[in-house]
Image: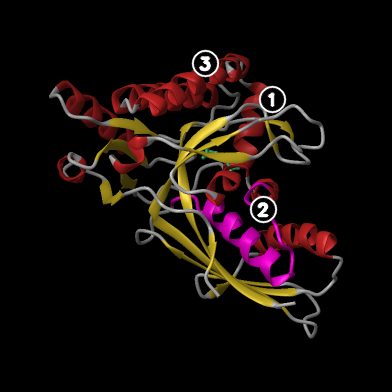
Amino acid sequence: MPSSATARACANIALVKYWGKRDAARNLPAAGSLSLTLGALVTETTVAFDAVLASDELILDGVPARPADLQRTSAFLDLIRAQAKVTTRARVTSRNEFPTASGLASSASGFAALAVAATTAAGLACSPRELSMLARRGSGSAARSIYGGFVRMHAGHAADGSDCFAEPIVSRLVDRVRMVIAIVGGGAPKAHGSRDAMEHTAATSPFYRAWIDQVPADLAVAEGALAAGDLAQLGTIAEANALAMHASALAARPAIVYWQPTTLALLAEVRALRDRGHAAWATMDAGPHVKVLTSIDEAEAIATALRAVPGASEVTISGPGGPATVTT
Ligand code: PMV
């Protein structure tokens, strides 16, 4: 059995968001979601099981990880150790190849790469679906990063989560889409992590139920757009869905506000670009950054326009990324 393996996985951006759980212990989402895996945002992770280690170790981007991150990684490795019937501790080394200091969430690519590297190192032969379900235990969005291109996450109904996994969606749009990522700096303290924030929204927002009830219809529109190769329809539903997710969070008590002034300026610029006939639709996650869905032909023009917005500290164009893979 190999005791060490390295894997690479790409982050993904949801076009129909995951925001709320039906089971926190198993990390089961309350509704489905749909995403695009991004080739420009990659995590590479090496897992080495080593009998001399007394406890797990985690080095993130060259420095020992914070205790909370180590604890989360260790709990995730326990799932794999239980499956592989081993108790050996592991040294985990992980590096994010993201736009410099982007502050983008890397949990999706991180847990997808960790799932692939750790199962391989433990000698487990897992199908992509099994890897997706495993990655989900680390972070809901990580289930989608097992696959490349457009990906659909199923909420499922089973109490044990056996029908809760992601799978790829084939669409000719994959050859045409680009995501332009505008990083909003400003040095504001990091806002609420998605895990706590979605729980708080579910517990206190009067709009949470409406949000969850809306997701299946949005998923149907997005899947229809992918089947038809209709970028405008996909972008329109993605922007509406992101705003609905944020509306549910804004209505939480106390409110969860991820937006900064530059976020709003970027959203206004995206609307202005559309008014001038450009293909540009915005989405935002648990942070102030704005990601803009566009076409390969328009990506440069959109990036140039976003770079001109005061406060947008870095703008990156990404094409679709591939599935999580073992490299060594
Ligand atoms: O996978 P988590 O627990 O980090 O949650 C992801 C939440 C959002 O990024 C806001 C939406 C999504 O579907 O990725």
Mark 3 or 1, nearer chain start: 1
- Considering the whole magenta stretch, tell me its main secondary structure: helix
Check disc 3 and report its element: helix, strand or loop. Answer: helix
Is residue 236 visible to us here? yes
Total residue callouts: 3
Part of the protein shown in magenta: 104-129
Check disc 1 and report its element: helix, strand or loop. Answer: helix
Q: CA distance from mark 3 to mark 2?
A: 30 Å
Q: Quadrant of the N terminus?
A: bottom right
Within 10 Å of disc 1 (Cα), the crowding (few <14, some 14-19, many 20+) is few
Mark 3 or 2, nearer chain start: 2
Within 10 Å of disc 3 (Cα), the crowding (few <14, some 14-19, many 20+) is few
Within 10 Å of disc 2 (Cα), the crowding (few <14, some 14-19, many 20+) is few
Query: Which residue is denoted by mark 1 in the rendering?
Result: 203
Residues 145 and 25: in front is 145
Give the quadrant of ligand 1.
top right
Using the rendered view, name the quadrant where residue 81 is placed: bottom right
Mark seen at residue 217: 3
Mark 1 or 2, nearer chain start: 2
Dot in front, 3 or 1: 3
> Label 2 sits on what residue type?
Ser
Residues under numbered marks 1 and 2 in contact, where contact means CB atoms less than 8 Å apart: no
Q: CA distance from mark 1 to mark 2?
A: 35 Å
Q: CA distance from mark 3 to mark 1?
A: 23 Å
> Label 1 sits on what residue type?
Ala
Residues 162 and 110: in front is 162
Image coordinates of residue 165 in percent, x first then y, are: 65, 39
Using the rendered view, name the quadrant where residue 70 is placed: bottom right
Query: Which residue is denoted by mark 2 in the rendering?
Result: 127
